[in-house]
Image (spheres, rainbow, N blue to C red):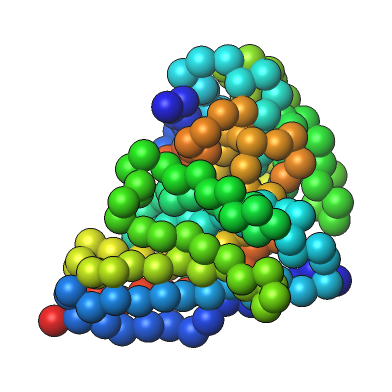
Amino acid sequence: DIQMTQSPSSLSASVGDRVTMTCRASQSINSYLNWYQQKPGKAPKVLIFAASNLQSGVPSRFSGSGSGTDFTLTISSLESEDFATYYCQQSYSLPITFGQGTRVEIK
Amino acid sequence: DVHLVQSGAEVRKPGESLKISCKGSEYSFNTNWIGWVRQMPGKGLEWLGSIYPDDSDTRYSPSFQGQVTISADKSNSTAYLQWSSLKASDTAMYFCARALTTTISPPEYWGQGTLVTVSS
């Protein structure tokens, strides 16, 4: 199985801050990496697919980069609605695996 | 617009059986993989497995193989997740998602989730 490791597990930030989080795969997954945002009691929402492609309708303050084993999700200027938990997920091989999540909290 | 609508919350006792559903609409249900994801209280996302309704090709996570059964009814555009004997540890929110498989395309559409509570 491909293990996905996210860091940090949580972070505190203020509105307007630039926020960066990382996801590392235990082996190369090319660019088969999705990023999700999840709010309590809601289904995950795709933000970025194929490592760096912005999903339709997602604000441009979100961006993704990386390939192989190391990936980054950046929020260029944090807004109040961005406080949530973020997950990465590899779709390179079965079983599909998710990172453990990064929780973004209000500072 | 594509929709995935899941069945409502369930409360069962340990040892009981359960089948929850996920109905797709406004897209070609038969030719799109549908997957299931578990989220235990306060925890992260775990993939259980996915099914291709057209030929019922089903792939399971090794962690869940033998613990759950995934099926689909093409005539009703509905996917199912079932347990034959529930445990307290099956208490979780369960989501279905379209295209949750090994593909570069994102699982853009998700159901709203079904909360399963198993308690004596």
> Looking at the image, is A35 positioned above or below residue A50?
below
What residue do we see at 67% from left, 19% from top? A30
> Looking at the image, is A3 positioned above or below residue B30?
above
Residue A53 image position (x, y, % from top left):
81, 36
Residue B10 image position (x, y, % from top left):
37, 83
Residue A13 shown left or right of residue B32 in the figure? left
Q: Quadrant of residue B116?
A: bottom left
* Residue ranking furthest to the front: B55
Quadrant showing the C terminus of chain B: bottom left
What residue do we see at 52% from left, 33% from top? A94
Residue A61 image position (x, y, % from top left):
79, 43
Quadrant showing the N terminus of chain B: bottom right
Residue nearest the observer in this picture, B40 or A96 = A96
Residue A74 visible in the snapshot: no
What residue do we see at 58% from left, 48% from top? B57
Residue A19 image position (x, y, % from top left):
63, 37
What residue do we see at 46% from left, 25% from top? A2
